[in-house]
Amino acid sequence: MMSRVIPLLGGLCAGAGLSQFPAYAQAYLQRLGGHVDALRRTVAEFDADAAALGLERHSALVQLARSGEIGAQRAETMAATIDRYERLAADLHELAALAPVDRALHLRRFAETDIAAATLGAFEPALPVSADALLLMAAGGILGAGGLRGLGALLGLLRRRSARMRQRRNRLA
């Protein structure tokens, strides 16, 4: 009886947890969009300053890097900001184009730790009322139940193997 109840409970818990992913993904997307907008403004201001001096972005970064310690540090920071903007904008573009269930298959696009942590900190679980959430809940339930059943089978196998080894030792003794 317990061998069926525990996987069922594990499946229900995993399913309930996974069913929250569409709501979390939506909240993450909103925060990601805010970060991309802020970074876009910063990069656009830098590009405008460079253009006012007749420079392209790369040339402006090189010139800034050659203008002393503070300039070199600022050029490095600005280059990192530009890289982050391009990476986050690509993540936002890809995630926004995906259906909610498909986003669960692109977890690498949710890898920005400060955005993920802030999203999780403010996240309030939603009820699984959408078709996407119900589908993910079912998938989580199947994965959770299967995982626990597999773990139970592995533990049973190890237990039986250990018992056989003890029996052999006892016979030899």
Image (cartoon, rainbow, N blue to C red):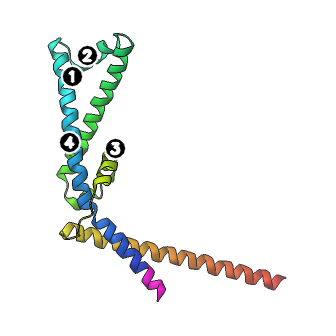
147 in relation to 24, above or below? below
Is residue 25 rendered to the left or right of residue 172?
Answer: left
Which residue is tagged 3? 114
- Neighbour tally class for label 4: few under 14, some 14-19, many 20 plus, Cα within 10 Å: few
Q: Earlier in the sequence, mark 2 or mark 4?
A: 4
- The residues bearing labels 3 and 4 have C-alpha atoms spaced at a distance of 13 Å
Q: Which of disc 3 and disc 2 is earlier in sequence?
A: 2
Residue at image position (25%, 35%) is: 86
The tag on residue 46 is: 1
Q: Are the residues at dot 1 and dot 2 in contact (C-beta closer than 8 Å)? A: yes
Which label's residue is closer to the chain start, 1 or 4?
4
Kind of residue indicated by mark 4? Gly
* Label 1 or label 2, whichever comes before in sequence order: 1
Compared with residue 50, is residue 98 higher up or lower down, i.e. above or below? below
Q: Are marks 1 and 4 in contact (CB under 8 Å)?
A: no
Q: Is residue 142 among the parts visible in the rendering? A: no
User: Circle 2 — which element?
Assistant: helix
Magenta-span inclusion, residue 46: no
Find numbered disc 1 in the image and state the secondary structure of the residue it sits on.
Answer: helix
- How many neighbours does mark 2 have within 10 angstroms: few (below 14), some (14-19), or many (20 or more)? some
Between 44 and 107, the one lying in front of the other is: 44
Residue 87 drawn at (x, y percent): 28, 38
The part of the image, by quadrant, that contains residue 114 is top left
Mark whose residue sits in front, 1 or 2: 1
Alpha carbons under labels 1 and 2: distance apart: 9 Å
Q: Residues within 10 Å of mark 3 (few under 14, many from 20)?
A: few
Q: Residue at x 20, y 18 (%)?
A: 56
Mark 2 → mark 3, Cα distance in angstroms: 29 Å
The image shows residue 136 at horizontal and vertical percentages of: 27, 68
The quarter in which the C terminus is drawn is bottom right
* Tag shown at residue 34: 4
User: Which region shows up in magenta?
Assistant: 1-6
